[in-house]
Amino acid sequence: MLTELLLWFLCLVTEGANYSIYDLICTDITESALTLKPVPDIDGRFVLTWCTEENRDVNKWRLQMYYKSVKPEQCHAGYDGATAFLHSSFEQNVKVDLNCTNICLTATLDAIFGPECYYIDTQQISNDIGTLLKSRQYQYVEENPNFTKNHVNESRASVIYQPDGDTVVLDWILAIPASLYHVYMVNNTDDNEPLDMECRSLSAQRVRCRARASPGRYHAVFTHDAPWNSLDFVTYKFHYDFTHKGIASGLPVQPQQSSSQWWWAAGAALALALWCCWLCWRCERRVPAPMRENILRMWNR
């Protein structure tokens, strides 16, 4: 039972966070290996895992991932018949202080579509020495009809605005899952500095952001900071204009009945009560006197 509660708590923490997509763990895997595997139930999201020997001089992890449209049998280093385009890139600071000889670096990557051949170039770097370890690999990703290149190219964001007192609440519903992002808003009425919003992920593609603000006209901006914003044909920044009225929302208000409806309801209740009294009177008249006396005698015992 305790284990289930802990897992439930971890799920809540993970779901509500604009979390880091990078991780480093100790492993028993002795052979260097790189994998790119899809995440179930989240279209376009993959986890890249690079397992290799540990080196305490490493300060950074660099990745560049390209894609090109070739057949599966052509997805290898010996084929140069197609142009490769940059899909994702990052350079992440790492600190290898684990008491182990082998490590696995992981990264969550989004907006991966198929059918494409992906070329993955990843390196572990020392600020003083340069590249210490590297891996280059090709991997073919099959087509997913639910998440194609057109889905990525035509990705949009819809926004739901609802005031909560003096707090602005914006729900961003996104076509591409959100992992790393930041959101701010600007008051169009005056020259105030941009106001960063506090956000949490309600699901992989829905983010809720909040910020206290005075009434006025505002412009909000949502920016994806994930590695896939290296794609040159994708919109990763979305804008939304709204007027904040500063009205408290609270819990949903139940519909109120009109005055005419209230009088009809009261009249119906009164008629029902009178009808019940009449039935009782009729029953009392119909029941023979001896039976009534027996009932009263049993009741008073």
Image: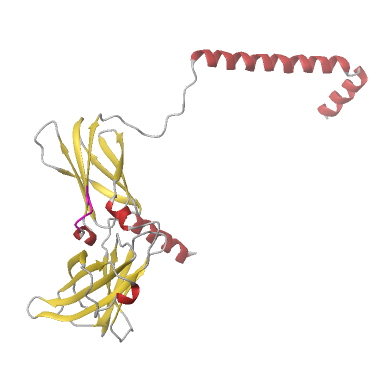
Q: Which residue shows up at 45% across the image and 61% down it?
A: 5
Q: Is residue 290 visible?
A: yes
Q: Look at the image and name its color scheme.
A: secondary structure
- Residue 112, image quadrant: bottom left
The furthest residue to the left: 128
Q: Quadrant of the C terminus?
A: top right
45 or 150: which is nearer to us? Answer: 150
Q: Position of residue 101 (x, y in %)?
A: 26, 85
Using the image, determine if residue 163 lies above or below residue 264. below
Q: Is 3 contained in the magenta span? A: no
Q: Is residue 241 above or below residue 184?
A: above
* Prevailing secondary structure of the magenta residues: loop
- The residue at 23%/73% (across/down) is 81
For residue 293, what is the image quadrant?
top right
Please provide percent x and percent y for residue 110: 29, 61
Q: Kindly tell me whether residue 100 is visible in this rendering.
A: no
Give above or below for 284 relative to 210: above
Q: How many marks?
A: 0
Let me know if residue 234 is in the magenta part. yes
Horizontal and vertical percent position of residue 29: 33, 84
Residue 42: percent from left, percent from top: 38, 59
- Relative horizontal placement of residue 86, taking residue 249 as reference (left or right): left
> Quadrant location of residue 276?
top right
**Closest to the observer, 204 or 83:** 83
Residue at the spot 40% in from the left edge and 58% down from the top edge: 145
The answer to whether residue 280 is left or right of residue 29 is right
Residue range in magenta is 232-237
Q: Which one is in front, 72 or 12? A: 72
